[in-house]
Amino acid sequence: MQSVNIADKLSGVTDHWAPKIIARYNDNDIMVVKVQGEFVWHSHDDTDDFFLVLSGRLTIRTEHGDVDLAPGELFVVPHGVSHCPVAEEETHLLLIEPSGTPNTGDPATAVTKLEI
C-alpha cells in the first residue's frame, strides 16, 4: 500500500488524449490525462463521465450547452449525453470511470488505457 503522487504521474505523460490509470477504486479506474485541442463528440450509454481539472482550462461542449472548467472545478456528464471536451491550452485532468469504459464511447476507436 502506498500513496499516489498525481504530479509525478503526470510528469511522465507525453501524449494527449490518452488516459493513464494511476489507481483503482472499487470497479473504477482513476486516471490522469493531458489534453490539448478538441476531442471527438461521443457519449457513454451506461456510465457518467467525470472530469476534474488539475491545471489549465477545459470546455465541455454538450448537446445542452457548453460547460467551462477552471483548475479545481469538476463536471459530471450524465450518461447518454453527447459531449466533446476542448482545451485551448494544455490541460491536466483527473478522470474516474468504470474499468473498461472506452474513452470515445466506442471500443473500436478507443485508446488502450495503460496503468502507470
Image: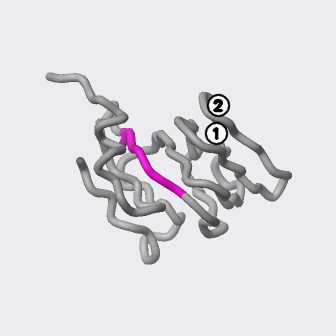
Q: Which residue is mark 1?
A: 76
The one nearer the camera, 97 or 19, is 19
The one nearer the camera, 69 or 80, is 69
Along the horizontal axis of the image, is 51 left or right of 8? Answer: right
Occupied quadrant, residue 71:
top right
Occupied quadrant, residue 22:
top left
Along the horizontal axis of the image, is 106 left or right of 14? Answer: right
Tell me which amino acid carries mark 2. Answer: Glu
In the rendered image, the residue lying farthest to the bottom is 108
Relative image position of residue 8 (x, y in whole percent)? 29, 37
Along the horizontal axis of the image, is 70 left or right of 115? Answer: right
Occupied quadrant, residue 30:
top left
Q: Quadrant of the N terminus?
A: top left
Circle 1 sits in a helix, a strand or a loop, which is it? Answer: strand
Q: Residue at x 36, y 55 (%)?
A: 100
Prevailing SS of the magenta stretch: strand
